[in-house]
Image (cartoon, rainbow, N blue to C red):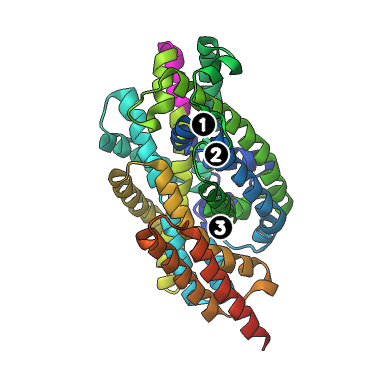
Amino acid sequence: MLGLRPARAGAGRTDDFLLAGRTLTLPAFVVTLVSTWYGGVLGVGEYSYLHGLSNWIVLGAPYYVGTALFAWGFAERARRSETTTVPDLLHGAYGRAAGALGTFVVFVLSLPAAYFLMLGVILRRALGIGQAAAIVLAAGTCLVYLTARGFRGVVGTKGLQFALMYGGFLVLLPAAIVEVGGFGALAARLPPEALTATGGKSIGYIVAWYVIALQTLVEPTFYQRCFAARSPRVARTGLFVSIAFFALFDAMTTFTGLYARALLPDLPSAVDAYPALAERLLPAGLLGLFYAGMLATVLSTVDSFLFVGATTFGRDLVWRLTGGRADQVIWTRIGLVVATAASAALALAASSVVSLWYGFYSVGTAVLLAPLAGALFPALRPPGSFAATGMVLAGTATLATFAWGGGMIEPIYPGLAVSFLVHGAGLAFRRL
């Protein structure tokens, strides 16, 4: 397996295990970032099947903006910080309380529950096994190569995963076009709202996704890759190049979802849109290739997120609690087991990929955006007590709106409002 190739001498060192020795070149940076970022392929299929072209507007374009903002403002600063994790940044900028809160939030954000749910759907259809068995199979595979080689194991698998994720849709989308016809024939078989900018959703809901896309500014896997880049310039340039690949993949997946809706309008579950369309159109050999591409796409994100969660557990929790005495490599490997078990439990309790994203990212963005901006830009840095208080209150406000808001307001708005108010008060206090 690619992830199990012998590690170079010194691979036991913490920096090598956690960040591949900070040696990612531009091609490696782009391949690992793009393949990691698109593990939610069945969630994209769910949304494009139900809401049509608005998938590109809601789940695509906002993240191009967020990635560009990260590249312009955060990427080079993150690499120059010479830190290892997001909680490291918070701990260094604000102290123990904010660092501990960041550790908890980053660990939760890194749990790939939505992606385990997607693996269950793919393997259930491909192998005829239950979702629980599919999760165990996928988790075992990831644990083997991540435990053996750490972040090098993650990077080592990405080239093949990148090729398979694009190759799968390069097989399915042309087959759908041949079956249905071009855009005119497709449009005639779709409900009118599938071709609108909103897809039947409210403007408020769509705007909320543009705010949620600020999650890219707090995304642990973005920071991890910037920390691992060979230079600040590689980190910044790699993000801009990645946007072009994001747009290409979004075009392929959105139109494939539209063709699934046209050919299979009565699917009981929209999450099954891509697999069901492939089973309808592709012969056995090409169907196998498509399933390999789907699995590679999801696994590429599962292993990356699991490793972030494991690093957060091993370094930011155990290592700090022991005053720097714990072996980070050993405890990161233990963290892989903990993160896998927690993710599987969440996946078994959920039914919608998009709902999982919406909830996790709303809370995470509200809690982390302002303090991370302050950590990277000293002029925007309040005292540590204000940062920690703002994180607690922002998370509480977001969760409370989920519980009792009754759909009247998107939960991320009150969370961000509280965060920026407390953050602003801290900046005013610092200047007194």
Q: Nearer the viewer, residue 249 or 262?
A: 262
Q: Residue at x 36, y 62 (%)?
A: 404
Amino acid bearing label 3:
Val
Q: Image quarter for residue 34?
A: top right
For marks 2 and 1, the one nearer the N-term is 1
Q: Magenta: predominant secondary structure element? A: helix
Amino acid bearing label 2:
Thr
Q: Image quarter for residue 78?
A: bottom right
Separation of residues labelled 3 and 1 (CA atoms): 33 Å
- SS at circle 1: helix
Q: Quadrant of the C terminus?
A: bottom right
Q: Residue at x 60, y 29 (%)?
A: 251
Q: Is residue 291 rendered magenta in the image? A: yes
Q: Nearer the viewer, residue 256 or 308?
A: 256
Please say if 144 is above or below 287.
below
For marks 2 and 3, the one nearer the N-term is 2
| Residue labelled with disc 1 | 193
Q: Position of residue 32 (x, y in %)?
A: 57, 41
Point out which mark residue 415 bears.
Answer: none
The answer to whether residue 168 is seen in the rendering is yes
Amino acid bearing label 1:
Glu
| Residue labelled with disc 2 | 198
Q: Nearer the viewer, residue 93 or 212?
A: 212
Please say if 199 is above or below 147.
above
Q: Position of residue 181 (x, y in %)?
A: 56, 12
Magenta segment range? 282-293
Q: Are marks 2 and 3 in contact (CB under 8 Å)?
A: no
| Residue labelled with disc 3 | 218
